[in-house]
Each structure stands twice: as C-alpha cells, then as structure tokens.
Amino acid sequence: MIDRIARDKAAEIARHFVTGQIYNFDFEDAKPDSKDPIIDAVWDSLWPFYCDIRKHKLRDEWQLPAEGKRKIAIWILFLHSDEEYRWPKISYPGSRPIVYNLFERLLGCHRKQERFFKAGNFEVWPFVDDASFLLAKSNPRLLNRGL
C-alpha cells in the first residue's frame, strides 16, 4: 500500500534529519501516521544513527559518514518512488546485518534475518532489486514534477 502523502512528508523529514537541519526528537515526533510499511521501516532503520536520550542534530560528533548518507539517500529515493515495499517485516531493516550472540542463535533469532536477506538485494534496500532501483534513479520523481 503506497501512501503518497505520507511518503512525501517522510522523505522531507528524513532528508532534513540526515543533513543536520532538525533535532533527533523533532525527527521522532514528525513521523507520518500511515499504514504504508516503508514509513515504519525507514524510521526504525534510522534509530541506530542517533541517541534517543540526548537532544542533538546529525552534525559534528553525530554527523553521518559518507557511506551512511549514500545508504539513506537510497531510502529517500524509495520514499519518492511508487514502488511497493516488498521486504519481510524485521526490526531495523536498513541497518542490517545484526550479529547474533550464541544465545540468540540458539533461540533461532538469526533465521528471521536470513529470510530477510533472501528477499532481495540488500545493497539497494528498500528497493528489492537492482532493476527497480535503477528505474527510480533514472526517473527521479521530484525533477519530473510539472514537466
């Protein structure tokens, strides 16, 4: 289910957050209310990048490395796309892989992550494959408005 209004709002908020324009608490509070699963997936994936106890922007000591910004740019591109989110539900999907300790492995926690990785090409998450990523990248929605 694609919620265009929520996706557009989420893309703008996420972009402002990762470029250090808004505080972490403002980011958390601004999450659009939607049943579109990509909204929860992106917010959940951004959580490991900041502190949820201390107020800060993603600047200075909290600034994201270039690779993190590149990864999140793909997430924002997805939010601007009309692609359905097709990955299985899992915590922190864009911030994987998670290394499980022995106890977690004995409980089988790693199996859910293994199923998740089999669902598509994680290098282009939240896109499921290179083709959908390249299509969105070659046809950016924001640059096509009004043309």
Image (spheres, helix red, strand yellow):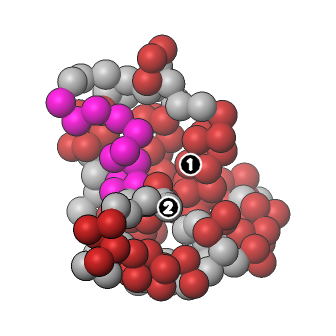
Q: Which residue is mark 2?
A: 97
Residue range highlighted in magenta: 43-53
Q: Residue at x 61, y 50 (%)?
A: 71
Give the image location of residue 143, x and y in percent.
Answer: 72, 52
The one nearer the camera, 128 or 122, is: 122
The amino acid pointed to by label 2 is: Pro
Q: Residue at x 21, y 24 (%)?
A: 54
Task: Examine the image and state in which quarter residue 146 appears.
Answer: bottom right
Q: Earlier in the sequence, mark 2 or mark 1?
A: 1
Q: Assess whether residue 73 is covered by the magenta stretch.
A: no
The amino acid pointed to by label 1 is: Ile
Q: Residues within 10 Å of mark 1 (few under 14, many from 20)?
A: many
Query: Is any atom of residue 31 visible in this view?
Result: yes
**Most common secondary structure along the magenta stretch:** helix
Specify the label residue 72 is tagged with: 1
- Determine whether the residue tagged by mark 2 lies in a helix, strand or loop: loop
